[in-house]
Amino acid sequence: LVAKQTATDSTGLDPNLLPLLKPVNQQVVSSIPTILAQTGPRIFSEQVQGVITFDTRNQANISSRVSGRIERLLIKYNFQPVKQGQLIMEIYSPDLVAAERELIFIYRNDRNDPMLQKAKQRLSLLGMQPSQIEFVIKTGKPIYKVPVFSSATGYILEKSQSNAPLSSMPSVTPVSSGGSDMGGMGGINSSNGAGASTTVAQTTPILIREGQYVNVGQSIFTIYKTNGVIAEFAFPPSLAAEINNAQKLVFRSTSNLDKVYAGSIGLIQPVLRNGENFTIARVYLPGSSEFTVGELISANIPIKKRGWWLPQEAVLKLGNRSVVFKKENEVFIPKQVETGFTVSGLVQILTDISDWQIAKSAYYLVDRESFIITSAGSNKR
């Protein structure tokens, strides 16, 4: 006969040792030093990167006032610099030529005819300048190719591309203002809508070609004026909650770190681009000529955070989880905790660990062949 044994003494071991015999992925027996979490606020700064872009609230649109054919086009690529009064293109319009011939006919028959003023007004509304109208009357011949001039100084962009997201920002320099305020055949509309989205620019060839027909009221080009730019910063989700509208921001150009600039955040916009979530903050810099579009900049955001703080080596990162080893009954139990910012080698712990004895170095307690089984902490704040 064999004596019957219970579960506690089946191995012949002391029952006091059984809690120490659990698998290493549930607890670890070690004499490694322990620490208590630090507490209190921490003040630090986080750096974010940005770029100088065009202020799309301040732009001019060039649209055709007549239907016709583009006979000559002087714009070859997007974001080509133009000056106010610069010739952009020449358009032939049968409707405009017919109106000019009507003016010539009225003038030759009776210079005092009240219809003469009406004919001049019609040509003016179609986009002809007073000097061009007088030239038609003086010579008695219609102008077949009527010029279209730029209404502003800046960078010109084909209208069909103005709303498309482009890949890279060109390094371009502002151009000086010059010329006269001549609209020609182009209808000019200035846009000052707040909160317009800024696209990243690329100097690509335009799609419009000579010989192409345009319709009445068709928008052809957009001109981004150079009398104001935007400092645009990209914030990761962890920092998005730390900024607010009208907040002061201090930044530097990466080409000159000694000079400091300041501005206020004028717009905060969540963005999903290329499958990545982040937040755009814009600082408007009106009348600024110190920056070049495409220039890289960086800013430091002051942040104040409270919580419990542990050294980085005491927190084990397991993918999207964070684990610490809490000492309980002479053994270390892995506990999952929620973390926040990392500042100067300290990790912010949002889980209440105020009375925990925690292993000073979590990496010494990991068995490389085991999957750690954790129990989540509690009392988050």
Image: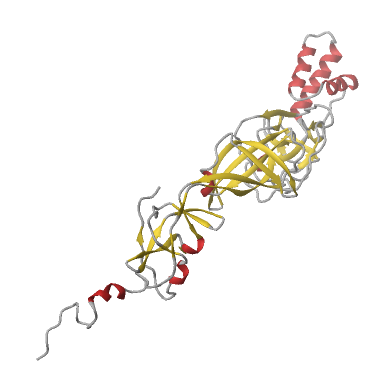
Q: Residue at x 51, y 43 (%)?
A: 241
Image location (x, y in percent) of residue 171: 75, 48
Q: Is residue 4 above or below residue 298?
A: below
Instruction: Please give left or right for residue 304 compared with residue 90 in the image.
Output: left
The answer to whether any part of residue 158 appears in the image is: no
Q: Residue at x 68, y 42 (%)?
A: 53
The quadrant holding residue 320 is bottom left
The quadrant holding residue 247 is top right
Image location (x, y in percent) of residue 190: 69, 29
Instruction: Please give left or right for residue 199 compared with residue 277 in the image.
Output: right
Q: Is residue 139 above or below residue 220?
A: above
Q: Nearer the viewer, residue 84 or 27?
A: 27
Instruction: Please give left or right for residue 317 compared with residue 286 in the image.
Output: left
Instruction: Please give left or right for residue 169 compared with residue 365 in the image.
Output: right
Image location (x, y in percent) of residue 364: 46, 71
Q: Residue at x 76, y 25 (%)?
A: 127
The answer to whether any part of residue 359 appears in the image is: yes
Q: Nearer the viewer, residue 29 or 253?
A: 29
Q: Nearer the viewer, residue 146 or 2?
A: 2
